[in-house]
Amino acid sequence: MVRRVVVLGGGFGGLKCAQALARADVEVTVIDKANHHLFQPLLYQVATAGLSPANIAWPIRNILRHQDNVTVLMAEVTGIDTAGKLVRHSEGETPYDTLVVATGSRNAYFGHADWTEHTLGLKDIDDALAMRNSVLRAFEEAEAQPDAQARLPYLTFVVIGGGPTGVEMAGALAELAKRAMASDFRHIDPTHARVVLIEAGDRLLSTFPEDLSAKAAASLRGLGVELRLGKRVQKIGDGYVCLADDQIFTKNVVWAAGMEATPAAIWLGVTPGHGGRVVVDDHLRVVGLEDVYAVGDVAEVQGQELPGVAQVAMQGGRYVAGQIVTPTDEPFVYRDLGTMATIGRKAAVAVIGRAKLSGFVAWTSWLSLHLVMLAVFRNRVIVFFQWIAAYLTYQPAARLITSVNSRRGVDRTR
């Protein structure tokens, strides 16, 4: 009987695992709530009108169409019977001999579930479109207000969280307002839009060297972004964000402050690790279970502190595929290919090996890496030319308000 491998999640880790099993004598089923693989590192560019959703996503079925041993199932996982080796989902049940959990992460609100009603998260395409609508609509609503005071909350954008996502969002929002939309309106001046980045720690990009954090902060200030470092959010309500020493009136709050794993640990019936992650050993096997692996953001590797980046998931997916085909005693070892964050036009910071880069060199490195990592060649070509056009014209490509409803703080779990 051919071994049945079920992969939960069509993100970086799950997709790489399935692809690496292309020539293996196994039957692979990939289960994902969405029908597409999403390149999440560029999701913020969809949210700020730089790219269209189809530029950074592609149907999972199409990516895996040449693999005769792969079946793709669009379904929402509801539970896992580890004793019976069954995955329960919205379309029924799927049996497995080996299970690979690669369901990623979701926004974490640190016990403040009520904040989801007043913030915009950024985990999937629906979130990005809702954020794009909200951001662009804010300028339209400001234009319609009768006086300057009434316009202020619409022209104030608060980003909570000073990690890579928060830094990139703040920079993109500032460039959208102060450059791309500068001359589009008659009653408001978008260059006066206020972008506030709040970070509870004492510096941005805490996983980067301090000098690069300082350069990122300087680049953001150069774009006019207000930095509130060492400040914790006390309360978020309808139209305001409260800090210990200030209250900011705003109609636009972006949440980029934390992540937690999807509820895979609950599905598996194991004790969750930090951030709800599934604890795995150095072979990425779930502790306490046989024939179950976890990779990427959903996994916590014992004895290792790994960053929540795509390369960790991709390398983990390839490693698990190898263990399924030919088990070895060699543990999983993450090979760091670099950490990067872009701040805006011609500005970025990067750590590649021992090299620390900033400015234009880091920015071009960031562009090159993200183009290469896009799943399909078509998207690489389109994104490349979109970036060239935006660079030359200062005009983002997708400034459309659609009929998608705003979805503040809603998470979608694969």
Image (spheres, grey):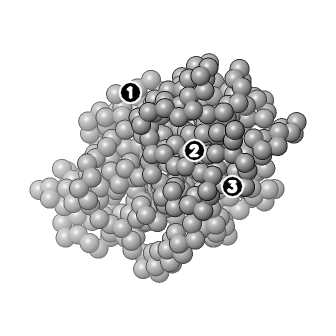
On-image quarter of the N terminus: top right
Mark 1 vs mark 3: give the one in front: 3
Which of the two labelled residues, at mark 3 and mark 2, occupies the earlier sequence position?
3
In the rendered view, tell whether residue 297 sits above or below residue 390.
above
In the rendered view, tell whether residue 186 sits above or below residue 329.
below
* Residue type of the residue flagged with mark 2: Thr
Residue under the point 71% across and 20% down: 288
Which of the two labelled residues, at mark 1 and mark 3, occupies the earlier sequence position?
3
Residue under the point 54% across and 75% down: 381
User: Which is more toward the observer, 175 or 165?
Assistant: 165
State the separation of the CA atoms marked 1 and 3. 42 Å
How packed is label 1: few (under 14 Cα within 10 Å), some, or many (20 or more)? few
In the rendered view, tell whether residue 208 sits above or below residue 345.
above
Residue under the point 44% across and 23% down: 111
- Evaluate if marks 3 and 2 touch, with contact meaning CB atoms under 8 Å apart: no
* Residue type of the residue flagged with mark 1: Ala
How packed is label 2: few (under 14 Cα within 10 Å), some, or many (20 or more)? many
Reading the image, the residue beneath label 2 is 29
Reading the image, the residue beneath label 3 is 22
> Left or right: 168 with respect to 361?
left
User: Which is more toward the observer, 283 or 95?
Assistant: 95
The reply to whether residue 252 is in sight is yes
Quarter occupied by residue 272: top right
The x and y percentages for residue 348 are 60, 62
Reading the image, the residue beneath label 1 is 113
The x and y percentages for residue 17 are 67, 48
